[in-house]
Each structure stands twice: as structure tokens, then as C-alpha cells.
């Protein structure tokens, strides 16, 4: 596989905000892909950055889909027709903070597990038939709590740990045809917290670009080796050190 092939097609599920959106911006700069499918619900940010409806390389295709609706996943993926995906990146997820005693049934089933586990697993298994055999990669963004549970993040920790186990199994099943990887970031400066009504100051966290650098490193590796997991810890953070 040549990592510089202009014919490669990327699919970013969650490319409309946060880490996925940051990856989209970076991939548009370096032109590794000829086409990028972006799956999400709200495309305002892409429109503001003029990433849609412009004749550009890569060609960006908007796939509006709520992945908690199984029928929407099926209809959405039918839009990519016979085209094959080389690299599938998943950055969809939600955040939950709270002591275990205070967690409600809806928090567990309707909200958190439904998106972070059931829907993401459904999307991943639905994309498998669309992948280029022998040359494809799947990279899922879970979280550092997948490895080390933290409180008051019991729900967040267990959904990420479950997804991590699923990814491990997928790696075994697809070995030799699709490289399956998992990146596990610490807290990053995105809107994921405020969307969950947690209005902490996120300015103290590294920007999503820090995670994107790790993702690109994993995706660009020679295809005969696989970095199965990348656990990121915040060691130091200095804005000046970020690539321009
Ligand atoms: N930010 C952090 O501190 C942090 C730390 C560790 C791990 N993570 C994990 O990294 C992943 C990305 O986090 P992030 O901070 O980038 O989150 P984010 O800024 O909230 O972005 C989440 C993305 O997922 C999409 N999404 C959410 N629900 C969806 C649904 N039902 N159907 C389709 N798309 C949906 C959003 O699309 P729309 O905006 O279009 O709805 C958005 O593109 C998550 O799994 C998160 O748990 C984040």
C-alpha cells in the first residue's frame, strides 16, 4: 500500500465536530485522499469552513446520519454505492460524568450505551463490506478511561472499555486484510463536555490537533506493521510546540 496514493478514500464518522473535524481539516491540507466521506448530523461547521460544495481535492461528501437509528445507517451507507473505503475513522461518542449511585436507567441504556457501544458497533460492522480488501484500515477513537477507569466517570469508563474489547476482537478477525487500531486520548479541548451539560473550562486541555497527530502517525505506518493501540497521556502542553 502506498500511503501517498491519490486514489485513497477516507471515511470519517464524527467528522463534523471535535477530534474528527480537526482530522478532516488536516487531511484537506495534505491531500492524501482523493475523497473524504464525512458522517455526522450537523454540517454547519463544514459549511462555515467552505468545505462543502466547492470543487476541491479531496472531494468532500456529506453523509447526514444519526447512527442511533439503525435504518439510517443502512440508507446512508447505500449512498456510497460500489465505492470502496480505504480508511475508516470513527470519532463518534458522548460523555457522561456522575457517581454510580446517581446514574439513571436512561443514562445507561437510552443515552450512553446506545451511542458509545450499540450504535458504534452497528456502524463498524455495517462498514466492513465496504472496505477495500487487503489495504484498508479502521481507526477508532475510544478514550484513556478504556484502560484506567476513573471516578466519577463510571459509565464513560465502562462503555469505552467495552468498545476497546470489541476493537481487539475485530483486529484478530481482520488480521492480514484490514488494520484495526484504537487511539485512547486523555481530555481534549472540544465541545463534548458542554454537550453533556458539563461546563468545565476546557482551555486547559490540549487541542484536538494533538490527537490527530497521533492518528496520522498510526494511519501512515507501513502496512506490514500495526500499532494496535495508542494510549496518550498529557505529559506537557505547550501551544508553541503545535505544528502550524
Ligand atoms: N474530547 C475529549 O476530551 C475526549 C477524550 C477522550 C476520548 N474522547 C472520545 O473521542 C471521541 C470524539 O470526541 P470529541 O471530543 O471529538 O467529541 P465531539 O466534539 O462532541 O464530536 C463528536 C462527533 O460525533 C458526532 N455524533 C455524535 N452523536 C452522533 C450520532 N448520534 N450520530 C452521528 N454522529 C454523531 C458529532 O456529530 P454532530 O456534531 O454532527 O452531531 C461529532 O461529529 C468520542 O468518542 C469521545 O468519547 C474525547
Image: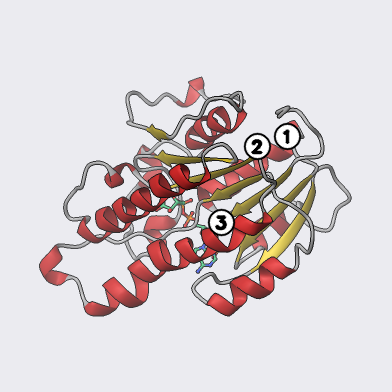
Ligand 1 lies under 8 Å from the Cβ of mark 1: no
Q: As drawn, is 215 to the left or to the right of 26? A: left
The percent position of residue 168, horizontal first and vertical second, equals 39, 45
Crowd around label 3: few <14 · some 14–19 · many ≥20 (10 Å): many
In which quarter of the view is residue 66 placed? Answer: bottom right
Residue placed under numbered mark 3 in the picture: 14
Q: Is residue 161 above or below residue 235?
A: below
Query: Label 2 near label 3: C-beta < 8 Å?
Result: no
The percent position of residue 190, horizontal first and vertical second, equals 45, 49
Query: Label 1 near label 3: C-beta < 8 Å?
Result: no
Ligand 1 lies under 8 Å from the Cβ of mark 3: yes
| Furthest residue toward right | 55
Which element carries disc 3, helix, strand or loop?
loop
Residue placed under numbered mark 2 in the picture: 26
Q: How many marks?
A: 3
Residue located at (34% from left, 50% from top): 165
Which element carries disc 1, helix, strand or loop?
helix
Q: As drawn, is 139 to the left or to the right of 58? A: left
Q: Which is in the foreground here, disc 3 or disc 2?
A: 3
Crowd around label 1: few <14 · some 14–19 · many ≥20 (10 Å): few
The percent position of residue 18, horizontal first and vertical second, equals 52, 50
Amino acid at each position: 500500500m502506498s500511503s501517498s496514493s491519490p486514489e485513497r478514500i477516507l471515511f470519517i464518522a464524527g467528522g463534523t465536530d471535535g477530534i474528527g473535524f480537526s482530522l478532516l481539516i488536516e487531511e484537506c491540507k495534505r491531500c492524501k485522499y482523493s475523497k473524504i466521506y464525512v458522517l455526522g448530523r450537523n454540517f454547519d461547521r463544514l459549511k462555515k469552513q467552505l468545505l462543502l460544495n466547492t470543487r476541491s481535492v479531496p472531494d468532500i461528501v456529506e453523509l447526514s446520519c444519526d447512527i442511533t437509528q439503525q435504518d439510517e445507517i443502512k440508507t446512508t451507507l447505500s449512498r456510497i454505492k460500489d465505492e470502496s473505503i480505504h480508511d475508516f475513522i470513527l470519532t463518534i461518542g458522548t460523555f457522561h460524568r456522575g457517581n454510580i449511585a446517581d446514574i439513571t436507567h436512561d443514562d445507561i441504556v437510552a443515552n450512553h450505551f446506545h451511542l458509545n457501544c450499540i450504535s458504534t458497533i452497528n456502524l463498524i460492522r455495517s462498514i466492513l463490506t465496504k472496505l477495500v480488501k487487503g489495504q484498508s484500515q479502521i481507526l477508532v477513537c475510544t478514550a484513556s478511561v478504556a484502560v484506567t477507569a476513573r471516578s466519577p466517570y463510571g459509565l464513560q469508563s465502562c462503555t469505552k472499555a467495552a468498545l476497546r474489547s470489541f476493537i481487539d476482537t475485530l483486529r484478530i478477525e481482520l488480521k492480514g486484510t484490514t488494520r484495526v487500531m484504537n487511539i485512547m486520548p486523555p481530555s481534549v479541548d472540544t465541545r463534548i463536555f458542554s454537550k453533556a451539560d458539563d461546563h468545565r473550562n476546557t482551555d486547559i486541555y490540549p487541542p484536538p490537533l494533538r490527537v490527530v497527530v497521533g492518528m496520522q502517525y498510526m494511519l501512515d505506518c507501513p502496512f506490514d506493521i500495526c500499532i494496535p493501540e495508542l494510549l496518550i497521556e498529557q505529559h506537557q502542553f505547550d501551544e508553541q510546540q503545535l505544528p502550524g
